[in-house]
Image: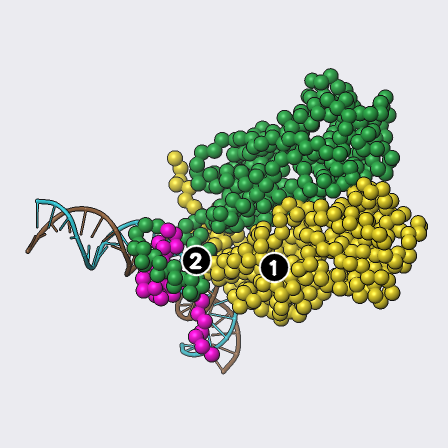
Chain colours: A yellow, B green, C cyan, D brown
DNA sequence: TCCCGGTGATTAACCGGTCCAGTCCCCAGA
DNA sequence: TCTGGGGACTGGACCGGTTAATCACCGGGA
């Protein structure tokens, strides 16, 4: 039996380096007030002993946890299908990592659950701040979380986020671009398969969609709302294609529904893109795997996540932030859109 | 200006309830030694004050953090596409939530990075344990993490996980079932598009695949390894279909590659399932969206995650665990598999 | 020679909980 | 009346860091 393998703490390191706890702390936080030699010695000893500062002790002292929270409120099986989130998360982490922070992730099933979770996280000081996503109109999270005073960054248009510092993509502009593109290809009956009606950005997109149709002198189409799930996208597409005046182009609110739409077209014998053009949203690898490949409105989701994380750090640090949009999604044409060859109607 | 809005701690709660800190602690940890009345009073006061125990302070005292770690080592854009992980994570969280634990998630880009991360997490006592996934043959993580003594559960066959408590799905059995099914449909040239050769379960599946072919007296096929990405699945499929003796059935290692395979078949004018049967792995909603729909080997990924989390709690608590497989994936036939109609070769 | 300012380090008081050794009190039993 | 024992609760040490206050020391200018 050798030494009792005592758990090493800052005290052991200090002793081994022949300095005080304070000195070790100073060294590890890269603060001024230590000679280069001592600093060196402390690091060497720490490495030999395999010591790293205990994060609980540290955040107890500094009273600012090095963790930020993210709650996603969608059924898991749906989340799995949305390439968006993983990419978004990886963007967040690219920023967190360089500040040696971590991401606390939780999947919740309702906004109320999220509110409770965020409150708990904040009360227990588990997180230093949170990222809020998927804003609804009159989002119920705004009031309780604002009054709680939790540092947060909202992903969504300022109209929706009620004063919480926000970052968003200019969906309205992107929708307009999509519609104009399809119109330029000669399409006149353009439909849209949107996300849940309550979801803020769905509403924004729908409004922009109808506005653009009107501006171009195209007939309005009755909106179809879904829950983002593929099955619903399929159902929506089917019903659109069965309408007496069936659309010649459909814009989807994510890429999974567009894939489903492609399946439905095949099933119904409607040729894409000859008879029907499809346009996906949130471009992901998936869009390049189908046949034909899917044209999509793509944006840098990874970079978006990174930007959001950076903004959250600003908020936590109390630096001033102003709401700002990030790069507008832009159109990536592929095989699922074409100018109208067969005259329909 | 009213009160200085002092940050409330256990002390304030204790004072307000007219008891000592210790009593509050006892109440919140549901320990014996308090009258029902006092207990009640403490909770009421705490609720009024909106207090919850500071998690850093708590885990500093108890020296066991209420967080577990998970590092995923694949390119983010690939992860996004694998519905598997989100579902897996949600399974983990269903168990964590009921013990009010949290999941620390990190995306890393190499195993070395993961090793460094896990070491840091453990040294800093940020996590109470970790879940390890995607084992390679002679996985480099085993030695350092074992010697570190971090409580962990490995997702993978015991042959791969080197003594780390493990849970796995019996992929060999599942592969055998898949091959037998295709053989029963009359297929004789069955190919397989696998994951990275280094990945443990890919190897296990490949071996089982070839073994089953042999057992059935079918000709072996040269293995095709990919990186799980859809593009690679497409490329692999293309090359398989160009072979002089092209396969009439292909088994994929995940569903995203199967979708890509479907696209390639369409592109090359090979009818599925008449001329070619496709079988996906890790069944997800995606398989029901394509046309034709994809037959798949499906399993309860959510439940799998939950099981893994439960096991990790056992490990952390020092309860004995033995390696065990969870439910074997089973075949869900859909539109992409059929008995051979056109005689090829 | 004395004083002064700056560098490099220490000291000790926190941070907000947990936990254990006691203290106090009340009631049963001798 | 005294003793013993158990339930209810308190006090304070501790967890492992951070940080403000303090101090020893040294070289240089008056």
Q: Which subunit holds the residue at mark 1? A: A
Residue situated in front as seen by the camera: A211 or B121: A211
| Residue drawn at the location 82% of the way across and 25% of the way down | B341
Above/below status of A210 relative to A8: below
Where disc 1 sits, the SS reads: strand
Q: Is residue B20 magenta?
A: yes
Nearer to the camera, A97 or A53: A97
For the record, the magenta segment spans B1-30
Which numbered dot is residue B176? none
From the top left corner, tell me how far across and down residue A121 is, in percent.
Answer: 51, 57
Relative vertical location of residue A87 with respect to residue B15 in this rendering, above or below: above
Q: In which quarter of the image is residue A113?
A: bottom right
Q: Say whether residue B108 is magenta.
A: no
**Element on which disc 2 rests:** loop
Whether callout 2 and callout 1 share a subunit is answered no
Residue B190, can we see it? yes
For residue B137, side relative to residue A21 (left or right): right
**On what subunit does the disc labeled 2 rest?**
B
- Judging depth in this view, the residue of A69 and A106 nearest the camera is A106
Q: Is residue B146 above or below residue C18?
A: above
Task: Give the mark count.
Answer: 2
Quadrant location of residue B298? top right
Q: Is residue A270 found left or right of C2 in the rendered image? A: right
Q: Determine crowd level at label 1: few under 14, some 14-19, many 20+ residues with C-alpha closer than 10 A.
A: many
Q: How crowded is mark 2: few (under 14 residues within 10 Å), some or many (20 or more)?
A: some
- In-image side of B233 versus B316 (left or right): right
Residue at 52% in and 50% down: B102
Percent across and percent down for residue B261 are 78, 36
Assign the C terminus of chain B to one quadrant of the image.
top right
Q: Mark 2 points at which residue?
A: B53
- Residue at image point 83% right, 35% down: B265
**Which of the numbered marks, if any, corresponds to residue A131?**
1
């Amino acid at each position: 039996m050798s030494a009792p393998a005592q758990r090493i703490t800052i005290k052991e390191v200090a002793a081994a380096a022949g300095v005080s706890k304070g000195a070790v702390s100073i060294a590890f936080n890269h603060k001024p007030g230590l000679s280069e030699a001592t600093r060196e010695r402390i690091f060497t000893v720490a490495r030999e002993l395999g010591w790293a500062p205990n994060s609980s002790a540290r955040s107890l002292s500094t009273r600012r946890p090095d963790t930020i929270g993210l709650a996603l409120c969608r059924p898991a099986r749906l989340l799995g299908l949305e390439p968006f989130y993983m990419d978004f998360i990886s963007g967040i982490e690219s920023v967190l990592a360089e500040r040696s922070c971590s991401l606390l992730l939780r999947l919740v099933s309702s906004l109320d659950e999220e509110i409770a979770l965020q409150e708990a996280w904040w009360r227990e000081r588990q997180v230093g701040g949170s990222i809020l996503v998927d804003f609804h109109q009159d989002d119920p999270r705004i009031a309780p979380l604002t009054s709680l005073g939790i540092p947060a960054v909202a992903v969504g248009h300022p109209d929706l986020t009620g004063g919480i510092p926000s970052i968003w993509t200019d969906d309205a502009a992107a929708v307009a671009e999509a519609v104009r593109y399809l119109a330029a290809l000669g399409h006149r009956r353009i439909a849209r398969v949107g996300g849940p009606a309550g979801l803020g950005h769905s509403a924004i997109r729908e409004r922009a969609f109808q506005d653009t149709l009107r501006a171009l002198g195209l007939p309005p189409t009755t909106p179809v709302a879904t829950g983002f799930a593929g099955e619903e996208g399929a159902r929506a597409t089917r019903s659109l294609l069965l309408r007496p005046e069936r659309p010649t182009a459909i814009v989807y609110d994510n890429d999974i529904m567009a894939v489903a739409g492609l399946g439905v077209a095949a099933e119904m014998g409607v040729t894409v893109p000859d008879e029907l053009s499809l346009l996906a949203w949130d471009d992901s690898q998936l869009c390049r795997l189908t046949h034909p490949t899917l044209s999509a409105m793509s944006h840098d989701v990874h970079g978006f996540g990174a930007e959001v994380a950076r903004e959250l750090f600003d908020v936590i640090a109390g630096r001033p932030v102003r709401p700002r949009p990030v790069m507008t999604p832009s159109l990536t044409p592929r095989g699922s859109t074409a100018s109208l060859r067969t005259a329909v109607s």
